[in-house]
Amino acid sequence: MITGRQGGKKLSHQERDHCIRCGTCCLKGGPVLHHEDKRLLRDGHIGYQNLVTIRKGERAYDPFTDTVKPVAQELIKVRGAGKEWSCCFYDPQHSACTIYEHRFFECRLLNCWDPAPLVDAAGKNTITRADIINAHDPILEVIAMHEQVCPYDEVEELLAGLSREEEKAEVKARLNDLVRKDLAIREYALSELGLRGEFELFIFGRPLFKVLGAITSAGALLPR
């Protein structure tokens, strides 16, 4: 349990009624975006370069159940800082949010001493890429093709086959094929459509080879 001190007394979450700026929530990862957050993009407080897409069916860590499982719907999440998943808007030197006045919906709901409002909002009224990309942008067609060619439901079926020795070689070959297709679509968008590299994680999510590497080696996956 995270605790703080006030007047020499150790305070638990249950006894606290205000934020002590310990940074724990920010260090565990950025929030998932809801429709209430679209104004932050519209007003320029955040950009696509600050976001990453968790695709439908991709395994992700659910902090509310403390489990890793495929997500039921596409989610847009704030990216981490560097190679870490701590929120990219968190300033660890000052234990502060760099966009606090324009913080996200989930951040405004989060009180570690009373998580009920955030728990109630989790997974509801969340946005997808189509909600925040111009409807006439050709990248939407590429996203649709990517989802069709590299679906996570097929990835899950193939991963299940890795436990069966007689299927392992065929499964690995198919997974490698999906990895190549995933990379090819990304390269097409970057080189032919002029997609900026800093937007790649928002447009296509994490590269499949990185997701598979986390699953097959460490078992630790993308946090929600």
Image (cartoon, rainbow, N blue to C red):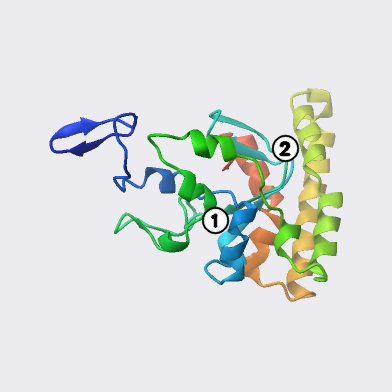
Tell me if 20 is positioned left or right of 200 in this view. Answer: left
- Identify which residue is drawn at 67% across, 46% down: 125
The picture places residue 97, in percent across and down from the top left corner, at: 39, 58
The picture places residue 147, in percent across and down from the top left corner, at: 82, 51
Along the viewing direction, whichever of 13 and 146 lies nearer the viewer? 13
Tell me if 54 is positioned left or right of 65 in this view. Answer: right
Q: Which amino acid does label 2 sit on?
A: Ala
Q: What residue type is labelled 1?
A: Arg
| Quarter of the figure with residue 16 | top left
- Identify which residue is drawn at 64% across, 69% down: 197
Residue 85 in sight? no
Labels 2 and 1 touching (C-beta < 8 A): no
Name the quadrant of the C terminus. top right
- The residue where tag 1 is placed is 79
Tell me if 142 is positioned left or right of 133 in this view. Answer: right
Q: Sequence order check: which comes first, mark 2 or mark 1?
A: 2
| Quarter of the figure with residue 145 | bottom right
Of circles 2 and 1, which is in front?
2
- Identify which residue is drawn at 68% across, 54% down: 205
**How far is the residue under mark 2 from the one under mark 1?**
20 Å
Number of the label disc, if any, that sits on residue 146: none
Number of the label disc, if any, that sits on residue 72: 2
The residue carrying pointer 2 sits among few (fewer than 14), some (14 to 19) or many (20 or more) residues within 10 Å by Cα, namely few
